Amino acid sequence: LADIYANCVSRVPWAAGRSLQLNVNDSEGEFILSRDPGLVRVAIHPGASQPDKRWPVHLFRDLSERLARLPNLEVVIVAGRRDVELTRAFEGIPGLVNLAGQTTPRDLANLFRECRLLISSDSGPMHVAAAVGTPVLDITMGSALASETAPYGKGHVVIEPDSECFPCLPQRPCSSGACGNRIAPETVLRLTEWMLGRRAEPEPPELPNCRVYRTIVSEADGLLAMRRVGALRPYERDEINERMRSLWLTLLDERTEWLPARPLADQKLVQRARIAQQAARTASRVAQQLAGAARRNRYTPTLHNLGELLFDQEQRVLDGLAVDNVLGSILAYLRIRRGSLSGDTVAEQARESADLYRGLARLLNALATPRTPENYAKNLHTDWIEDAHENSAQWT
């Protein structure tokens, strides 16, 4: 998302990659923290904006107890005012410092600068830590998607449950909490020791019931990416994320059509993308006909009939994208574009709509079309014909 927003803003002086320099003044509060230079400080933020995005607090407590027993390590709890009650679960842990409800955003930035690591679910403080260069161990839960909202920068680690139902749909948050309990405190402790440089990178048997990623900067495009850690087998969603990444780069950087090297494994997604793609192609042709009829001042019944037909095809596109969680991001993009048509006449708006749906059909190729040497030439020829002719009669 940071990459997307960066492409939408002009004249912003990016210091390095997509990072902005922060001028953080002195903290507003005074905290009782150890000044021992040999002490390693680890911050823990157990809150989140939604309960389903939060790793269970009793597991945070278990992890904190394990961390407190490590030599030369201080644990600091941070949380907003609304989560103060939540942090009472940490009472009684020797040496632990609880700053819940005592920090402003400026305080957090300064505090995190003094920490070697922040352990948190997907949250605002997680991004504050990443912004000041503090490594983050992000425990991703619920409807959070690390491929979209991971801590921004190199060297952060993301852990998510290896569960059939993950991620949750935002409209239907998890009520069982089953995926949260799949991530064991021992696993998070193992990753913490690795990130602190006290142990080597974990082996696959040390990461049960979860998937782990480390954030990197892609050599291919210079943007944030994630590398799988300790994996014995591929994960289908990783492949989907790569396809979506290429799709958005096509859109943001106006690149030529991206050609996948192999068929997508998720056949349900492929089929849904094909249905939406075909509806988009039909909508583009109908919009072209409507634009031509409006320019030639064809009689009103023709315009009315074509307008109704275009409305029906547009609804098919919207319905086709809405049935799949992955396609939902394309649906959001389409709604923004449809609401941004600038033409003053029916002909102008119809022409813009035709261009919009033709472009959408091309984007969906990243998901809908398994490219092979046999069908590549056929698809390329079809795309060229659609671009070169304005109405369905000529296209046929």
Image (cartoon, rainbow, N blue to C red):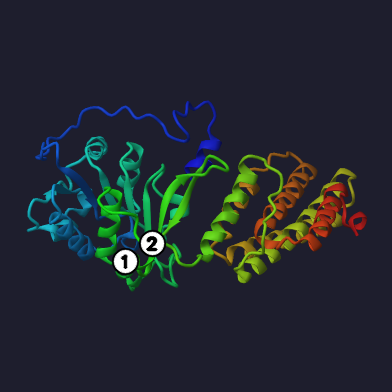
Tag 2, which secondary structure? strand
Nearer to us in this view, 114 or 11: 114
Instruction: Say which label, 2 or 1, has the lower sequence index.
Output: 2
Residue 266 drawn at (x, y percent): 60, 68
State left or right for residue 2 relative to residue 281. left
State left or right for residue 254 relative to residue 293. left
Quadrant in the picture for residue 34? top left
Q: Which mark is residue 183?
A: 1
Residue 75 drawn at (x, y percent): 16, 50
Quadrant in the picture for residue 52? bottom left
* Above or below 132: residue 289: below
* Above or below 350: residue 208: below
Q: Contact, CB < 8 Å: mark 2 with mark 1?
A: yes
Q: Amino acid at mark 1?
A: Ile
Residue 380 drawn at (x, y percent): 81, 54
Q: Residue furthest front?
A: 200
Residue at image x 13%, y 55%?
Answer: 68
Q: Amino acid at mark 2?
A: Glu
Residue at image x 27%, y 52%?
Answer: 119
State left or right for residue 244 relative to residue 167. right
Q: Which mark is residue 160?
A: 2
Q: Residues within 10 Å of mark 1 (few under 14, many from 20)?
A: many
Residue at image x 70%, y 65%?
Answer: 274
Of the 4 image quadrants, the one containing the C terminus is bottom right
Nearer to us in this view, 13 or 353: 13
